[in-house]
Image (cartoon, grey):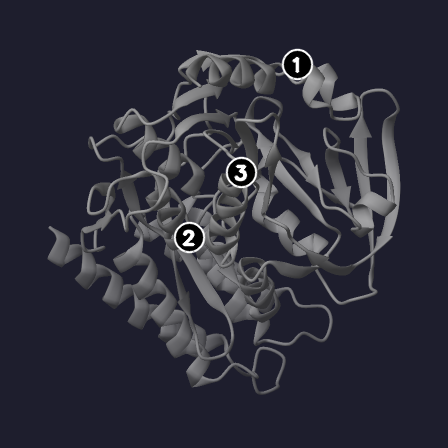
Amino acid sequence: MEKNKKIFVKVICVLLLVFLSCFSKDVYGTQSAVTFKDYIKLAAVITDLEYMYDGDINERKLMTSAMDTISYHITNREDEMNEKDLIDETIKSMVDSIQDPYTIYMDEKEYSDFNSISQGKYVGVGIQSSVKKDLNKIQVIQVFENSPAEKSGVKSGDYIIKVNNEEIDASKEDRLTTLLRGEEGSEVKMTIYRQDTGNMEINMKRATVIINTVTGEMVDDKIAYMAVSTFDENTSAHFEEKLKKLKSQNMIGLILDLRDNGGGLVNECINMVSNFIEKDKLIETVKGKNYPEKKHYSLGGDYVGLEMVILMNENTASASEMFIGAMKDYNLATIVGTKSFGKGIGQSVKPYNDGTALKITTSKFYTPLGNNIHGKGFLPDVKVEYEESLYRDEYSRDKDPQFQKALSIMRDKV
């Protein structure tokens, strides 16, 4: 069955190349700018989708969508058009037909922006956002310090309605990232909704945003608080540095805040959680349809046995859920807050020679006890809601019910 499926895809690829060749010239009496290399790339993307994607793909729907896109653009073109764009349009159409929000095709600029995020800095407006599935909206959950967004008055809790007049809903999480990033000094217009004031238009100029992913301090003479906003390539190193400093200040208990942490680099998460788990113990298992099973083990650390409470919420996702899954399975922390997001799948990035790339769902991850929480999330040990009204006020730990509960639990522990 699988063999026939792959043969079918290859046949379709050949037919598509013929189809493209038929329309590549003389529709308007001019030679197409599309080259044979473009066709080869399209076929390569199709093959990568079919082989790598850890889910079901309806090949007929996928290919029909691609052909419809090509046919529409060529037969109804009313202005001068770079026909090379047809390849990108076709690929994006194919990817969209899979209906997986985590599988995306990135053009050269989008892929460059994607890479910059993992480096801890990027050019944009300086917000972190999260999908609110029940409202079909995207909400600002963090505004970075000294960013264009902060200087323009954007606040945590705002809903993003439009960017440069393009409507934004829950399905456009990756699209939003592209819209907000760009060249240094370029302008972007964002329409936000705030409960007290309604819709507001905010104009900003993009600038370099430095992401400080790790913060921390002592909250009393025994208990430390640390927050990790995402996992970029510097996170685990900064986390260990901060741990050492707090230990020198007599830390014997830690409240770790992973609320609104949407994930990031898996290796950074493994390095970070290894601080608390005995060396060579299983942290996670990753496997997929054509993804070889891999098991990741703890590297060991100097903080095994440290008393911990972890804060999570509905925006705690992916790598941060991986962290929590390992800590829960080994009973190493008390989890406080609300149910996590539920993203138990992983993506691989396949770059192409022209600077574009395909980010595609290739695997699922499982906790040490074999649990996959995709679409389900983790339940906290102690459920504490964070009222929507609190987002409208300036943040204060004294008014944060989840932090206060974590602090109370930790004081009982130490």
Disc marking residue 252: none
Residue bearing mark 3 = 261
Mark 3 or mark 2, which has the lower sequence index? 3
For image coordinates 33% across by 51% down, the residue present is 60
Residue bearing mark 1 = 387
Tell me which corner region of the image, top left, top right, bottom left or bottom right, holds residue 36: bottom left
Mark 1 or mark 2, which has the lower sequence index? 2
Badge 1 local density, few (<14 within 10 Å), some, or many (20+)?
few
Badge 2 local density, few (<14 within 10 Å), some, or many (20+)?
many
Q: Amino acid at mark 2?
A: Glu
Query: 252 and 385: which one is in front?
Result: 252
Residue bearing mark 2 = 268
Which element type, helix, strand or loop, lies under badge 3?
loop
Res. 318 in view:
no
Tell me which corner region of the image, top left, top right, bottom left or bottom right, holds residue 369: top left
Which residue is the extreme one toward the bottom?
31
Mark 1 or mark 3, which has the lower sequence index? 3
Q: Amino acid at mark 3?
A: Asn
